[in-house]
Amino acid sequence: MNKKIVGIVIIVTLIGIIGFYMANRNKIVQVDAAVAVEGSIEKYVEELGIVKAKNQGDIYASASGTVKEILVDIGDEVKKGDVLVKLDDMQVSKEIQGLEAERSAILAQYNEAKESVDIESIEKLELIVKDMERRTQKAEETANNSQMLYEAGAISHEEYKNTLDNLELEKSNLEKIKLDLELMNK
């Protein structure tokens, strides 16, 4: 009897499996379809970055001033020593004229002091000495600042040299005025 029950269970199971297979055999699988369209494929990528030149360098002029004329165009090949721009030299000429006028004024004061030696002239010369000392001190500060800027590459050698020349001129003028004062006091 046990064998009959086991046989019946096996037959029922086989009939169930065959029935399930037959029921699912004719099912249609649903799919999505689309019509192909001719066109181009584009891809857009947005990124942040830094673009650097392969060969890069800083350019410093050996003189300062306003650009008068540009002698090369963008993209022109240049080599070391080529003149790129012409500078307006009016500023330097004005500085020279100012220094010459100052020198003339100091010489006039000297000659005036030489002609009339009195207390007022000595006091006036002492004031000029104080003013020249102040100007010399300011020229020293300017020269020190220019030295730091030159060493940092922020100004040209010519600008730095001009401040040193101006300092030497101020020191020389101060010494001349001091000598004049000593002569008047004798």
Image (spheres, rainbow, N blue to C red):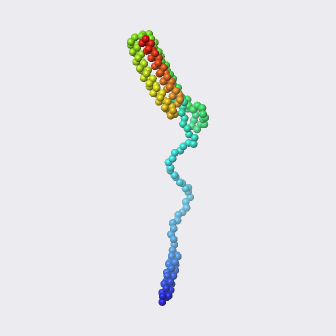
* Residue 37 seen in the figure: yes
**Residue 35, percent across and down?**
54, 63
The quarter in which the C terminus is drawn is: top left
* Residue 101 seen in the figure: no
Pick the front one: 90 or 168: 168
Residue furthest front in the image: 186
Residue at 52 percent across and 27 percent down: it is 161
**Residue 115, percent across and down?**
44, 10
Residue at 52 percent across and 80 percent down: it is 18
State whether residue 14 is above or below residue 184: below
State whether residue 102 is above or below residue 49: above
**Residue 19, percent across and down?**
50, 80
Residue at 51 percent across and 68 percent down: it is 31
**Residue 73, percent across and down?**
57, 35
Count of marks placed on residues: 0
Residue furthest bottom in the image: 1
Quadrant of residue 133 in the image? top left
Residue at 43 percent across and 15 percent down: it is 181
